[in-house]
Amino acid sequence: MSSFDRRAWLRLAGIGALGWLAPSLARAETGVRRKPLVVVVQRGALDGLSWVVPHGDDAYYSARPQLAVPAPGRGADACLPLPGGRFGLHPASQPLLALYLEGRLGFVHAVGTPAATRSHFDAQDVLESGTGGASSRDDGFLNRALRSAALHTAAPQAAGTASSAATGSSAATLGAVAIQSRLPRILRGDASALAFEKLTDMRVRGPAAKLVGKTFEEMYAGAVDEALRSSASGAFDADALLGRVRTRAPSPRDGVVYPKSTLGRRMRQIAQLLQADVGVELAVTESGGWDTHVDQNGRLQRGLTDQAQALRAFLDDLGPLAQEVCLVTVTEFGRTVAQNGSGGTDHGHGSVMMVAGGGVRGGAVHSRWDGLERDVLFEQRDLPITIDQRDVFAHVLRQHWGLGDTSLVLPGFAADPLLALG
C-alpha cells in the first residue's frame, strides 16, 4: 500500500484527524497543560430572544403577541429578572440563575456569524469553519486552535527544553474529544481529535471499522511512514486511557443529578474525562431540537429545561475543577423577531451565546443592543448581529488558553479588543 493510499485509508476510516502529532504530544514535551475548554453546539438555531428575554423592549411583545415570554412578575411563566432591568432568563433555565448571580456565568446577546444565510447547513459550516462566510477550507477553527496552541507551547521546546522523548518518559493523553457519534466539522483537521458517543463504545468509525483490532494494528505496525505509525499508536493509547477512565470514573458528587437525556449523558462523560485527569483540553458535544417552527413554547420549555439541568449538573459535578474550565454554548443563527402562523418562529440571524466557568466575567449580558424596532432589524425581520461569534471565541482562546495570536485560528479576522468577557 502506497503512502498516499494509507493516508486516504485513514480518512475513510474516520480517524484522519489523528495524522498530526502536535497537540497532545507537544503538551507532553513542553510540560504545558492548557485549561479545559468545553463547547456545546446547539444545532437547529436556538431562539435567543426566548432564552435571554429582552423584556425591557416593547417591540418584543408587539412582534410576539402569543409567543413572548412575559416580563418578570407577570405570571408563573414569566422570565427571571437579571440585574440591569433590560433582560430576563427563560424560567426553564432557572438552574443557571444562581451561577449568573454568583458571577460564574454570563451571556452574549445579538451575536452570530456575519453570513446572511438562513440555511442550517451553510450557517453551521460558516460557524465551524470560523471563516465568517463561504470557504473552501475543510478544517474547523477549533482544530486550528489546537494546532496553533501546540505550536505556541512548543516554542520553548525548540529553544532547548527537554522533551519526554529525551527523558524516556511517556505522557500519552487524549487532548481533544467529541462526545458524539461523528467528529464534527469544528474539530476536523490536522490536529488529533477523537469522537465517540459513549466511553464504553469508543472505536474507529467508517468503512474500515471492521478492521479494528489485530488487523488494524498489524497494518500500521508495518507502515514505513513514521507519522502514520504514530497515528495508529496514538489511537490505541487513547483507547487504553479511556479504559482507565471506565475503571476509575467517579460517581456524581452528592446532590448532583444529570437529566436522563442525550445531553445529560454527554455532559456527564465530559465531567468523567476531566475528573479522571487524562489530559483532555478540549471537549465538544452538541444538542438538538432547537428548530422551533411549530409549538415553540412547548419545545423550548422542554429543551431549555434539559439544557439547564445538564449544564448545571456538569459544573456542580466538577466541584473546584470548574474554576479551571471554560464552558461555551453556540448556535448557528437565531430566529425571526416576529412569530409565524404556526406557533413558532422561522430562521433568523442574531442569537445568544453563554460563557461559564473560571475566569468568566459573569453576572452580565454582554451586548450592543440596538433594539427590536423594525427599522433596525436585519432585513427588517431579524435580530441584528452586533458581536461576531469569532470575537467571543478569540477572547476565550486568548484569556483561557493564553493564545495571544489567533490569526491562524480565525484567518482574516481582527478580534475586537473591547469585548471583555473575562
Image (cartoon, rainbow, N blue to C red):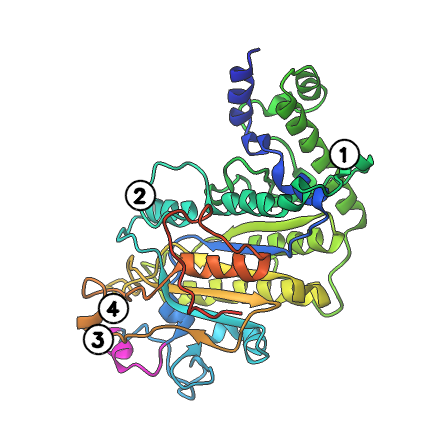
Q: Which residue is mark 3?
A: 373
Q: Is residue 314 visible?
A: yes
Span highlighted in magenta in the image: 54-63
The disc labelled 1 sits on which kind of residue? Ala
Q: Which residue is mark 1?
A: 165
> In the rendered view, would you say 273 is above or below 327?
above
- Which label sits in the foreground, 1 or 3? 1
Q: Which residue is mark 2?
A: 134
Residue in the picture at 66% in, 52% down? 269
In the image, taking residue 297 as reference, residue 35 lies left or right, namely right
- Give 378 or 118, whichever is nearer the viewer: 378
Kindly state the secondary structure of the residue where label 3 is placed. loop
Residue 107 spot, x, y in % from top left: 46, 70
Please tell me which of labels 1 and 2 falls first in the chain: 2
> In the rendered view, would you say 363 is above or below 351?
below
Q: CA distance from mark 3 to mark 4?
A: 11 Å
The disc labelled 4 sits on which kind of residue? Ala
Please tell me which of labels 4 and 2 falls first in the chain: 2
Q: Which mark is residue 338?
A: 4
Can residue 57 be found in the magenta stretch? yes
